[in-house]
Image: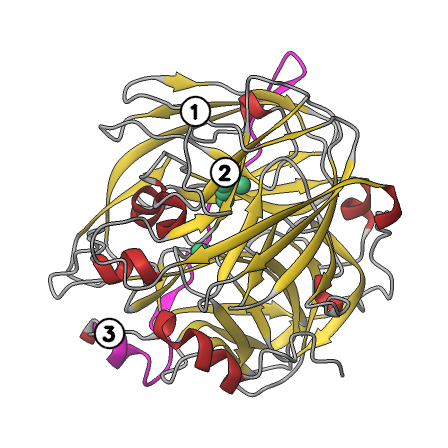
Amino acid sequence: MTTPVSEFTRRNFLKTTSAAFVLAGAFPLAVSAQQSGATNPLKIPAQDAGRDEGGVRVYDLTMQKGVTTFFEGYKTATLGLNGDYLGPTLRMRDGETVRINVTNTIGETSTLHWHGMHLPAKMDGGPHQTIPNGTTWSPEFTVKQKAAALWYHSHQMEKTAEHVWRGLAGMVWVDDAESDAIELPKTYGTDDLPLVLQDRRFDSNGGMEYNAGMRDMMMGMVGNVALTNGTVDPYFEATTEKVRLRILNGSNASFYYLGLDNDQPFTQVASDGGFLETPVEMTRLLLGPAERAEIVVDLTPGQVVSLRNISNASGFRFLEIRAAETLTPSPAIPARLTSIEWLDPKDAAVTRRFDMETRMGGMMGGNSHTINGKVMDIKRIDETVKKGDTEIWEIRNVAGMPHVWHMHDVQFQILDRNGKPPAANERARKDAVTLRGGEVVRLIMRFEDYADPDSPFMFHCHILEHEDAGMMGQFVVV
Ligand code: C2O
Ligand code: CU
Ligand code: CU
């Protein structure tokens, strides 16, 4: 068995990032709940496949204020899309034209970004595509995407962290001919589950206010309660031999080091941008904020097994899976899942370098999170890329703390990490990559389609407090 993130031994990982995992002042209800069996049935977001309007697949999403009962007897103010907290899983297909009517009723300006999607910058939902309260924004684009589990979230300038924290996020699942044909579990909510993993900080009244202090702005806002699809301490009753978990790290700032509590192996079949070429068996999976992984878990009849974050001392549980006494057979995982067109560094027109930097101790109010020494300026274009070009982007985390590099528009490939080939589960289409302190990754990507000198795409750290503090830049494709 391979250990794809072998560098991330528990000890080493804790050494560099422990601060991001400390669950301070845990909400008492959550702690006691985790001592025994899980307490709440896992919530499964509704699926929304839109409706056909003259050949266009049309969706309606309303950003709204909500009240959520995370803990029995406590009402928590939240935000959601077509609901109280989080939003539906949008289902769409490669090649079709979609339109999403996004209506904002939250009482302040927001945006909705399609994370991981390849689309025109004007449709991207970044900080330039603001949706004032009481208005509707209706991006329309053709899906040009391999089958993948993507997501959407607010991207409002300097407010992304707060809006996502309060609940403005959901998943987008893209299908194509390949995913239709592949022998993997694919019955939504039965053997194919969206798992939006988050942590949120609750106060003793059940409140989940976004009140980031100085330390939170530096390290990122970390919670004291784990949520899975907005469920506290959930269980899922499995009826099949295999379950496919489409996991999104939807946290603001936490790195989850996931494993099953009995250390049984699981199989990763997809990364951010779709299937891996071949399945990768593993026992531990590191996911930084915004990263996704699809894993398949094998169950035996009557088994109870839990998915946990094992990177902090309490090892909080994200999901308890309870297998039925009789399980419906699931086919074996195919040995080959897809083919990826690997980009050749020899074809790269340009190499660009980006330093992600954090200056600790910036107590005097100076900005501490930068890319190439700069903080985001929405009027400044940082990079200009030529349409059709293949490029190499070399990202260095020159800080001591981990950061997550994310860029819009493309799915990239990791050429190397610290000069060595990427781990088997990172040989994939990706749009976000975790860099521990001191790490360097070289990414390669091709900028197909959608030249627009007036509308930039973003690149940024996906620790949302860092993004909001200005660890973000803009590129245009011309
Ligand atoms: Cu997930 Cu710029 O965003
Ligand atoms: Cu994005
Ligand atoms: Cu960061």
* Mark 1 burial class by Cα count in 10 Å: few <14, some 14-19, many 20+: few
Give me the disc on residue 24. 3
Q: Which residue is mark 1?
A: 379
Q: What is the CA distance from the residue labelled 2 to the residue labelled 1?
A: 10 Å
From where the camera sits, is residue 342 visible?
Answer: no
Q: Using the image as rendered, state which of residue 128 and residue 167 is in the foreground.
A: 128
Residue 355 is a magenta residue? no
Which comes before the other along the chain, label 2 or label 1?
1
Q: Residue at x 50, y 78 (%)?
A: 13
The residue sitting at 54% across, 53% down in the picture is 355
Question: Where residue 112 appears, x then y in whole percent?
Answer: 44, 32
Measured Cα–Cα span from mark 1 to mark 3: 39 Å
Element class at badge 1: loop
* Dot 2 amino acid type: Gly
Question: Where residue 59 sits: x, y (%)?
Answer: 51, 26
Kind of residue at disc 3 = Ala
Q: Quadrant of residue 269?
A: bottom right
Seen in the picture, residue 119 relative to 43 is either above or below; the reply is above
The image quadrant where one finds the C terminus is: top right
Inspect the magenta stretch and tell me whether residue 46 lies in it. Answer: yes
* Residue ID for mark 2: 473
Locate residue 453 relative to residue 311 in the image: left or right.
right
Mark 2 touches mark 3? (CB < 8 Å): no
Residue 311, compared with residue 219, is above or below; it is: below
